[in-house]
Amino acid sequence: MNDEIWNLSARIYADLRSRGHTIDDFDILIAAMCIEKEYTLITHNTKHFENIKELMLEDWQGLTVNVS
């Protein structure tokens, strides 16, 4: 955690709130960390995170892996 992640978390919270969306504080921190580090968040709960701008999001549910 660094100041940029805390500041980004606050901006995400304010943006979501102003548009009538809310999610858990810890989820906002997770999203801010992913944005700051340019990571893609892998989750089946995409609907929960889809309103966060700049967040790269993927759902691997149902992904078929061929292991030989």
Image (cartoon, rainbow, N blue to C red):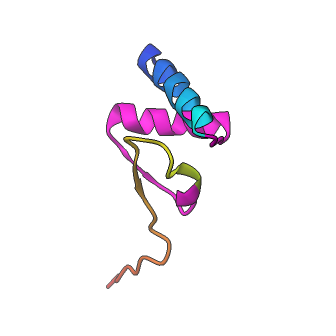
Whether residue 42 appears in magenta in the rendering, the answer is yes
| On-image quarter of the C terminus | bottom left
Furthest-top residue in this view: 3
Camera-nearest residue between 25 and 68? 25
Taking the spot 65% from the left edge, 42% from the top edge, the residue there is 23
**Left/right of residue 58 with respect to residue 30 in the rendered view:** left
Q: Whole-percent x and y of residue 26?
A: 63, 36
Residue located 62% across and 43% down the image: 21
> Image quarter for residue 42?
bottom left
For the point 51% across and 31% down, which residue is it?
12
Q: Given the current orientation, which residue lies at the most extreme front position?
A: 19
Does residue 29 show up magenta in the picture?
Answer: yes
Segment colored magenta:
20-47
Q: Position of residue 1 (x, y in %)?
A: 49, 22
Question: Considering only vertical position in the picture, is 16 above or below 68?
Answer: above
In-image side of 19 versus 3 (left or right): right
Is 65 in front, or is 44?
Answer: 44
Where 49 sits versus 10, above or below?
A: below
* Vertical relation: 11 (above or below) 39: above
Left or right: 51 in relation to 58:
right
The reply to whether residue 1 is visible in this rendering is no
Q: Position of residue 33 (x, y in %)?
A: 45, 33
Towards the viewer: 67 or 50: 50
Camera sees residue 42: yes
Q: Quadrant of residue 64?
A: bottom left
Q: Residue at x 35, y 81 (%)?
A: 67
- Numbered label tally: 0
| In the image: residue 33, left or right of residue 13 | left
Q: Where does residue 59 sit, x and y in percent of width and height?
A: 46, 64
